[in-house]
Image (tube, helix red, strand yellow):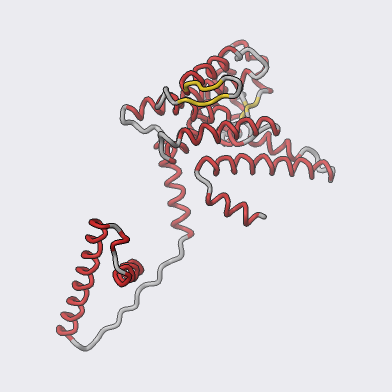
């Protein structure tokens, strides 16, 4: 089953991969929680959540700075993750109509980070939240998802979506109403979540606004990711064996013949490539396809 899930993960687009990651984290935490209860191991599941969730206390945050990133992949219950993942699927697909995969990754992470920063700042700046600072925590992908929604709405405000019991509405109208609801519910029971929503929405608006001006803010996220991937892929890549050279006694005549054959082969490949440009790959004969394939392996 694990192999099937891994193959499915590899074939998914970036939206599906992020849903897989969120679901995997949720399932692992639930399984650990169940086994910890059955074997009297204490609250292991809750300990993992506390390790990953974002605290509003600056002192706690300094002791676990990674939570500013990990919190956006953690959910408190089934309905929480279900709503967020359905929203991510729907609006993530819409987002990919207007942006690239790299923009999705950058906007999701920037939205989550912006939401987390807004949450921490609000709880430490506004007197209203002072009594709750030491015991308030943030989890969930809502801020990242709302960044995806707002970024899509700013790029194509007239794009229409169908809502149950409402009908067809503009994406921009949906985004404005969602942000407005989050703002008016700041003083409610989920104050921290709604503040994070506003931070994520601000990030989504800023990403698209700057892209329209030719500035890609998502590179702030993607460049470090590229560096890490390159670092690990370089370490894991097997060393290439040094080619073994053989030398003949033919002297200059042998070198001349070798260079002539090499030039002829290169000219032949150039001719095949020109033929592809003019008539496409299907215009090649079977022999030409074979020669092109053999050349690609050398």
Does residue 298 show up?
A: no
243, 211: nearer the viewer: 211
202 shown above or below 86: above
Residue at the image position 61 percent from the left and 21 percent from the top: 165
* Image position, residue 124 (x, y; %): 58, 18
- Quadrant assignment, res 97: top left
* Image position, residue 98 (x, y; %): 40, 34
- Quadrant assignment, res 79: top right
The quarter of the rendered structure image containing the N terminus is bottom right
Q: Give the number of marks.
A: 0
The quarter of the rendered structure image containing the C terminus is bottom left
Residue at the image position 53 percent from the left and 18 percent from the top: 179
143, 88: nearer the viewer: 88
Kindly give the residue lying farthest to the bottom in the view shown: 249
Q: Is residue 44 left or right of residue 183?
A: right
120, 85: nearer the viewer: 85
76 shown above or below 276: above
């Amino acid at each position: 089953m694990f192999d099937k899930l891994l193959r499915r993960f590899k074939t998914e687009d970036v939206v599906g991969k992020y849903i897989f990651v969120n679901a995997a984290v949720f399932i692992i935490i639930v399984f650990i929680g169940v086994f910890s209860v059955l074997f009297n191991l204490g609250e292991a599941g809750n300990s993992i959540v506390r390790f990953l969730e974002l605290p509003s206390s600056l002192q706690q945050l300094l002791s676990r700075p990674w939570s500013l990133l990990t919190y956006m992949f953690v959910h408190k219950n089934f309905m929480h993750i279900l709503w967020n993942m359905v929203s991510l699927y729907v609006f993530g697909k819409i987002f990919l109509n207007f942006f690239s995969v790299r923009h999705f990754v950058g906007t999701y992470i920037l939205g989550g980070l912006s939401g987390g920063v807004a949450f921490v700042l609000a709880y430490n700046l506004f007197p209203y939240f002072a009594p709750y600072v030491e015991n308030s925590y943030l989890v969930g992908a809502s801020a990242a998802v709302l960044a995806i929604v707002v970024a899509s709405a700013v790029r194509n405000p007239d794009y229409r979506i169908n809502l149950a019991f409402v009908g067809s509405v503009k994406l921009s109208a949906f985004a404005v109403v969602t942000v407005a609801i989050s703002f008016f519910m700041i003083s409610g029971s989920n104050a921290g979540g709604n503040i994070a929503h506003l931070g994520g929405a601000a990030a989504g608006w800023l990403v698209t606004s700057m892209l329209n001006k030719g500035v890609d803010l998502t590179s702030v996220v993607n460049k470090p990711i590229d560096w890490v991937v390159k670092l690990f892929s370089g370490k894991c890549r097997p060393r290439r064996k040094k080619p073994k050279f053989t030398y003949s006694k033919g002297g200059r005549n042998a070198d001349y013949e070798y260079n002539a054959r090499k030039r002829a082969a290169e000219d032949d490949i150039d001719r095949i490539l020109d033929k592809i440009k003019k008539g496409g790959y299907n215009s090649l004969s079977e022999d030409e396809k074979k020669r092109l394939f053999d050349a690609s392996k050398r």
